[in-house]
């Protein structure tokens, strides 16, 4: 395997025993032969440690100890990583078969790039896909306007990751978004039109339990970037678009958190600043509107149609 680059995968976990085994297996069953796997448990009180021990002979390194949150846990693993390529997979998400091999091929094709990202399925608590989250090739300005890279579908070049000093622990929800922005400033990022991961949406997921907090942290993040010379000039030149993106991002998570009134107000602010940015989310605008009217059956029908389309496309 000397000619195959080492890939390091880090999984942070805390009381996710319900989903953890599926996550571990999605890494351990990859067809790429040169992977080191690091699992960082935050002193879980459920059966997580028992599950980790079940696979301990296949895991390169693991620990179970208290930490200050997800950013610290991920950084703990990233700083131990030895691989040229690094991935981070949360303990309720999954890699698709062949994802790591595809990522390695992409890095070999573009030695100048620091980050590769792809599409991801959205799956429910039972692992049933209900949406395909498609990205596109983003610029740094696109990222600052909160066009989102799905975190489990991203792989990083470790040398670039080290240059930006890993995750900022001051952020608890958007640490990955800030990381991508910092990496995109110093090295090319490249979109690969494949499906590399599945992101799980369930009742205990942060996007459901802390939906309103995403928009608040996005505003804090942009204020932070305004104070950094390397980002301030980009914000000044694209302020309406970027702040419109912040409001659209806020609205998206408010919709998912079942706060349609707040979501529509945020979409309105987004539209007034930069109409095309807001209208890029027109399906979610309709979902928020129907939810506000109490037409949940329409929303449920939309979800069923998306699920059927995914099955047909397979």
Image (cartoon, rainbow, N blue to C red):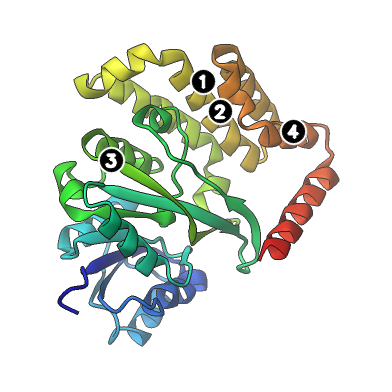
Q: Give the residue number, with chain letter if any, for mark 1.
A: 244
Residue beneath the point at 43% across and 78% down? 25
Q: Which comes before the other along the chain, label 4 or label 2? A: 2
Is tag 3's residue or tag 4's residue first in the polypeptide sequence? 3
Q: Tell me where residue 122 appears, x and y as whole percent.
A: 58, 56
Question: Residue 213: x and y, percent?
Answer: 48, 36
Judge left or right: residue 246 versus residue 104.
right
Q: CA distance from mark 2 to mark 1?
A: 6 Å
Q: Earlier in the sequence, mark 2 or mark 3?
A: 3
The tag earlier along the polypeptide, 1 or 3, is 3
> From mark 1 to mark 3, how far is it between C-alphas?
25 Å
Q: Nearer the viewer, mark 1 or mark 3?
A: 3
**Going by the image, does 60 lie left or right of 305?**
left
Residues at marks 3 and 4, CA–CA distance in whole angstroms: 35 Å
The reply to whether dot 2 and dot 1 touch (C-beta < 8 Å) is yes
Residue visible at 32% across and 60% down? Answer: 87
Q: Are the residues flagged by discs 4 and 2 in contact, CB closer than 8 Å?
A: no
Identity of the residue furthest to the front in this view: 109
Which one is in front, 171 or 285? 285
Q: Provide the secondary structure element on which disc 1 rests.
A: helix
x 54%, y 13%: residue: 273
Residue at image mark 4: 286
Q: Quadrant of residue 307?
A: bottom right
* Residue 67 in sight: no
What residue sits right under mark 2 in the picture? 248
Q: Locate the N terminus and report the quarter of the image it occupies.
A: bottom left
How many other residues sit within 10 Å of disc 3, few (<14), some (14-19) or many (≥20)?
Answer: some
**Dot placed on the residue nearer the N-terminal end, 1 or 4:** 1
Q: Which residue is mark 3?
A: 188
């Amino acid at each position: 395997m000397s000619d195959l680059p080492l890939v390091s995968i880090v999984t942070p976990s805390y009381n996710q025993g319900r989903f953890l085994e599926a996550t571990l297996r999605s890494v351990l069953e990859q067809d790429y032969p040169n992977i080191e796997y690091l699992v960082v448990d935050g002193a879980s009180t459920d059966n997580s440690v028992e599950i980790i021990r079940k696979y301990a002979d296949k895991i390169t390194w693991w620990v179970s100890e208290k930490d200050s949150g997800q950013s610290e846990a991920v950084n703990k693993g990233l700083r131990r990583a030895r691989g040229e390529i690094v991935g981070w997979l949360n303990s309720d998400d999954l890699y698709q078969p062949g994802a790591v091999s595809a990522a390695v091929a992409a890095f070999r094709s573009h030695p100048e790039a620091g980050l590769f990202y792809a599409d991801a399925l959205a799956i429910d608590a039972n692992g049933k896909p209900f949406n395909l989250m498609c990205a596109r090739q983003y610029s740094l300005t696109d990222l600052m306007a909160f066009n989102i890279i799905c975190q489990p579908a991203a792989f990083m070049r470790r040398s670039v990751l080290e240059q930006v000093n890993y995750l900022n622990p001051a952020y608890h929800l958007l640490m990955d978004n800030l990381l991508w922005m910092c990496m995109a400033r110093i090295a090319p990022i490249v979109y690969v039109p494949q499906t590399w991961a599945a992101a799980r949406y369930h009742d205990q997921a942060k996007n459901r339990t802390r939906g309103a907090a995403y928009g608040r942290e996005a505003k804090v993040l942009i204020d932070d970037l305004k104070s950094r010379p390397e980002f301030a000039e980009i914000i000044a030149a694209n302020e309406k678009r970027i702040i419109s993106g912040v409001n659209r991002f806020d609205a998206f998570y408010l919709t998912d958190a079942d706060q349609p009134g707040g979501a529509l107000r945020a979409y309105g602010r987004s539209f007034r600043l930069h109409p095309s940015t807001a209208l890029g989310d027109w399906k979610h605008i309709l979902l928020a509107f129907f939810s506000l009217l109490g037409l949940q059956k329409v929303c449920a029908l939309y979800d069923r149609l998306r699920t059927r389309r995914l099955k047909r496309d397979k």
